[in-house]
Image (cartoon, rainbow, N blue to C red):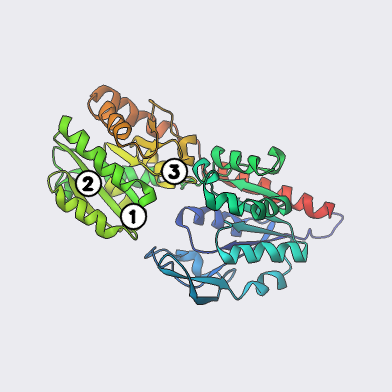
């Protein structure tokens, strides 16, 4: 109350192309924030390569609104049509004070940004990028347009330090940015991990990894995820540690390749397939000695934080944004991308020294325990405040 009048709540719209499970806890907090009036707008089609992903219980909230998309068959990206949202008019008809836009690679998000500029609505751009992408031909061609997107944004929420450096190179000021990592609900995962570890023996039997040293990869099956280098590193590692086994779970365009490579190494690899939810993820990590993320580039890599939350050290490449949470030699190792020898060396340095491995497992949990949803939500709210100040200036 102010001067006997009820304060008007700030209207915040979220434009999010596909539901992303690790953001749902933040969205729940947004919807329950008494200082804000929030609407979440998302596309109403399932992601073709992401089975089983949805907003879950949030999907029944009337403030979570599905918008239709139009596909353009002549234009394709990979195996999917180029699509654009046909319902963004509903977002602007609601007259939000601030719009949170997650990503800039989808046509729908680009259209939302253009409409924000047209309607003079301040927007916060949340994005992931890496230093490898910064040097790519696609990025260089896209750079002039991207610089305009950044220039018109009220503020930005880069996912990592490397992403912030990328935006800095595009002319963004540090005062415009607050790093909001792509982190899961660490405390919830730690609790579920503790439960999963009570069934470790059963899980080991199911996966046929009793008495083995277990490496785990979970993610999309794409070439840029370093799949080839990972299998080559496995071959090098098993020459020195014959009991090492790679368990690989995920989905994607390279599924046939992954299955073939696992079939070629029946003693040292296990194909798990799509990992359905946090429960299965914690189940896999309950038997893991080490997590692998050999990506050529990765804006963040939330599964790394999930591994650390489960007490599993992680080996990642230098081009991953989650290098912000991996301390080299403490809770994992950071290696060069596209370097199977370096990846194998990191694996062997970890698993061949039981004392080092035990220390890294203890430190994995410690290094992420303070990355709570309270911390992430405070970062998100600070961006909304910054954007609101931008609206007041206009």
Identify which residue, 206 or 324, lies in the foreground: 324
Residue 227 pos. (x, y %):
31, 47
Identify which residue, 112 or 287, lies in the foreground: 112
Q: For the residue labelled by badge 3, is the local secondary structure a helix, a strand or a loop?
A: helix
Q: Residue at x 25, y 56 (%)?
A: 257
Q: Residues within 10 Å of mark 2 (few under 14, many from 20)?
A: few
Identify which residue, 109 or 81, lies in the foreground: 81
Q: Residue at x 42, y 31 (%)?
A: 366
**Count of numbered circles on the image:** 3
Q: CA distance from mark 2 to mark 1?
A: 28 Å
Residue position marked by numbered label 3 in the rendering: 187
Any part of residue 123 in sight: yes
Q: Is residue 240 above or below residue 181?
A: above
Q: Is residue 86 above or below residue 372?
A: below
Q: Name which of mark 3 and mark 1 comes first in the sequence.
A: 3
Q: Quadrant of residue 312?
A: top left
Q: Residue at x 52, y 71 (%)?
A: 83
Residue position marked by numbered label 1 in the rendering: 221
Residue position marked by numbered label 2 in the rendering: 199
């Amino acid at each position: 109350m102010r001067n006997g009048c009820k304060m008007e709540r700030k209207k915040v719209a979220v434009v999010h192309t596909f539901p992303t499970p690790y953001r749902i806890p933040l969205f729940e907090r947004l919807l329950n924030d008494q200082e804000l009036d929030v609407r979440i707008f998302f596309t109403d089609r399932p992601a073709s390569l992401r089975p089983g992903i949805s907003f879950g219980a949030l999907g029944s909230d009337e403030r979570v609104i599905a918008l239709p998309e139009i596909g353009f068959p002549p234009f394709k990206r990979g195996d999917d049509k180029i699509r654009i949202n046909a319902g963004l008019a509903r977002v602007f008809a609601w007259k939000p004070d601030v719009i949170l836009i997650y990503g800039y690679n989808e046509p729908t998000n680009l259209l939302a940004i253009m409409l924000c500029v047209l309607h003079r609505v301040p927007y916060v751009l949340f994005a992931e990028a890496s230093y490898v992408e910064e040097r790519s031909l696609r990025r260089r061609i896209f750079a002039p347009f991207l610089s305009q997107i950044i220039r018109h944004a009220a503020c930005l929420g880069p996912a990592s330090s490397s992403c912030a450096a990328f935006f800095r190179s595009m002319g963004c000021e540090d005062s415009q940015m607050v790093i909001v990592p792509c982190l899961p609900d660490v405390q919830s995962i730690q609790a579920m991990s503790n439960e999963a570890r009570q069934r470790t023996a059963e899980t080991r039997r199911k996966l046929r990894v009793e008495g083995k040293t277990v490496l785990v990869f979970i993610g999309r099956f794409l070439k840029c995820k370093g799949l080839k280098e990972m299998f080559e590193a496995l071959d090098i590692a098993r020459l020195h540690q014959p009991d090492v086994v790679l368990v690989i779970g995920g989905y994607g365009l390279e599924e046939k390749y992954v299955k073939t490579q696992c079939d070629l190494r029946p003693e040292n690899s296990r194909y798990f397939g799509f990992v359905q939810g946090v429960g299965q993820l914690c189940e896999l990590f309950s038997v893991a000695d080490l997590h692998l993320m050999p990506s050529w580039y990765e804006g963040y890599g939330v599964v790394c934080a999930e591994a650390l939350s489960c007490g599993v050290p992680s080996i990642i490449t230098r081009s991953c944004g989650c290098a912000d949470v991996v301390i080299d030699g403490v809770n994992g190792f950071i290696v060069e991308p596209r370097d199977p020898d370096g990846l194998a060396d990191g694996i062997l340095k970890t698993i061949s020294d039981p004392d080092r491995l035990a220390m890294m497992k203890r430190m994995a949990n410690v290094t992420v325990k303070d990355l709570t949803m309270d911390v992430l939500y405070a970062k998100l709210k600070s961006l909304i405040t910054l954007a609101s100040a931008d609206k007041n200036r206009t």
